[in-house]
Amino acid sequence: MNLNEEWLMANSNGSFSSSTVSFANTRTYHGILVKSDPNNYNRYVILSKLFEEMIFSGKKYTPDTNYYPGTTWPDGFKYIQDYSCSPYPAVAFNMEGNAFKKSLIMDTDSDTVIIRYEFPEKVPERINLYPLLAFRNFNNTIKSPEKKFVSGEIDGYYTFASENFLLKISKVGHFIDKGYWYYNFIYPKEVERGTSSMEDLYMPGTISIENIKNPLDITVTTEEKPTGGFQEIMGKFKNRGKNSEKDPDISALRRNSSNFLLKNDLIAGFHWFGPWARDTFISMPGLILTGRNYDMARKIFMNYASNMEENLIPNNLYNQSFERSADASLWFIYALYKYYAYSLDKAFVSSLFERVRAIINSYIQGNDDFSLDGKFISVKKAPMTWMDAKIGSTVFTPRTGKPIEINALWYNALKSYVYFSTLSSDKPDKEVTDILSGFESEFAEKFIVSGKIADTIDPVDTSFRPNFLFAYSLPFPLMTQKNFLEKARLELATPYGIRSLSPTTPEFKGTYYGPQYERDSAYHNGTVWPWLVGSYITACVRNGYNPNDLYRYFSQLYTLNYVPEIFDGLNPGNPRGCIMQAWSYGELIRSYYEDIKKGRGKPHAGKVN
């Protein structure tokens, strides 16, 4: 058992609860209740920990664990007997024959966490709970005495307030006001990342409980009127997002993918990402459409369509200024095409037809960042693609000129537009049909350079990257040559994802580690990305590879409880970045249903051809 294995539960507000098996927080992002501001998806660690003491037969036991400089204290991890994260985190302890289980569950629709203590044999004489408060942005740390806290009681809850936040904890037992700071908590993952890694936490007092119920439920909330007990919330949690799946090959992916679902968008990744258009529309087929959650898909489309500027989809709805990317609007059209392929909802697609036309015309007219050059989209500034790592003025993978996946997406957007025009009983603009005429042959002529596949042209860059896979895997493919897929199999594919750059390239960086500059320089220069497995599988299955062999090769990835953002390029079993990334889940799930499961002749969740 890995006691530093992380767990996470999130709700439709973007708030979450997360820590490790031992409940030792290893990141600034960990906390029992981390609250999101839905206006901008800034998140705040409200309750960092709930430190416990349990008294059995007059002896005090502490099941908690924390990191401090050079040591851990207390050593409650030694009492851990078992751990499960399905369908919610639950840790079993045995303290010299005194057993209990601690479970946590988060309401899917409100900022409420319930902690349940169950005692299979003997109930303790007393439990002391010590709330450790932070009330700070989850990227930062605090030091004593930066914040002032006020304790109180209201309507069956103990209350703790600071600035604009109010935390409520079940009024059980009696509260002993103390007001201490606990010093020098260390977050090892932040030490590793070269970010703020030491902080102090405020302990307002002790909640001392006797005459203990079994089970004992403690509600932690920032809601004015929290509703629902443990069992009710568990029912909602299990049924959230229509993401149930009995197939063991994909059940963990489906269950945990619910964490990304907001009310009308998707969180790109946990812990630190908010919603991003590119990630949302790449993820939508796997996370939403395969479960036939069409109502949510429509809400997301309308959320972005109603916030278009310059006839483009903003890459981030929650920034104060409009932010362009070369591909977010093209992924919007891709996802709309997939929506129709699954739902056959002609009326909704037709209602967005003019938005699609406007996007196409916006690319044709061009702007300061990208424009049409002949038949192809040319990117003038960087970073404009998904390979967007940047620090200050340093862009690590600029990819200006004509990136291959941008132009594969452009071709698919044009073909989708023509298809939608037929659905809408309209006629496509002549300018579009002129661009499409001869597009396929010119694409092959331009992007295959001296037998190599170019990542960009004008200027030509034949560094072997995975972006060409989209020319195979999108709904309207441009490529079928097997030799490039074989080269990808040999140089880019790993059991945990697809490398962002071939190890044969001098610029290849095999480890994603250290301070931000070092990490970002490796981010798209060799680091392994699980989300690219989706396009790789689709490309391979379309071109005759065995779907069962592909599943077996990636089976470790498919059966992970938490699929991270990235892995090291030279040791791809080493997870890095976010512990959960939406498009990692989305593309694994989509390719499983559309390619692997379909290839096995099993029933398919949607209607995709």
Image: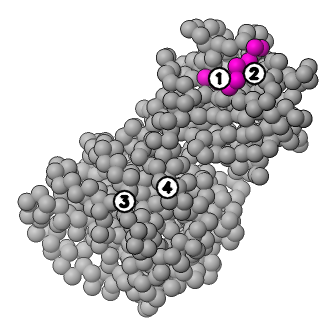
According to the picture, the residue beneath numbered tag 3 turns out to be: 605
- In the image, 316 versus 542, the foreground residue is 542
Residue 129 — which label?
2
Of mark 3 and mark 1, the one earlier in the sequence is 1
Q: Which mark is residue 246?
A: 4
Above or below, comparing residue 11 to residue 509 in the picture:
above
- Give how far apart the Cα atoms at labels 4 and 2 are: 38 Å
Q: Secondary structure at mark 2?
A: strand
> SS class of the residue under badge 4?
loop
Considering the numbered disc 3 on the image, is that residue within a helix, a strand or a loop?
A: loop
How far is disc 2 from disc 1 in space, using C-alphas? 10 Å
Please state which amino acid type lies under the numbered disc 1. Ile
Badge 1 crowding class, 10 Å Cα cut-off, few under 14, some 14 to 19, many 20 or more, is some
| Residue at the spot 32% in from the left edge and 78% down from the top edge | 478
The residue mark sitting in front, 1 or 4, is: 4
One can see residue 494 in this view: yes
Q: Depth-wise, is mark 4 or mark 2 nearer the camera?
A: 4
Residues rendered magenta in the picture: 210-219
Q: Earlier in the sequence, mark 1 or mark 4?
A: 1
Q: Amino acid at mark 4?
A: Lys
Percent coordinates x, y for residue 413 in the rendering: 26, 64
As measured in the structure, the alpha-carbon distance from the residue carrying label 1 to the one carrying label 4 is 32 Å
In primary-sequence order, the first of circles 2 and 1 is 2
Which of labels 4 and 3 is toward the front? 4
Which comes before the other along the chain, label 4 or label 3? 4
Report whether 192 appears left or right of 38. right
How far apart are labels 3 and 1 at the CA level?
39 Å
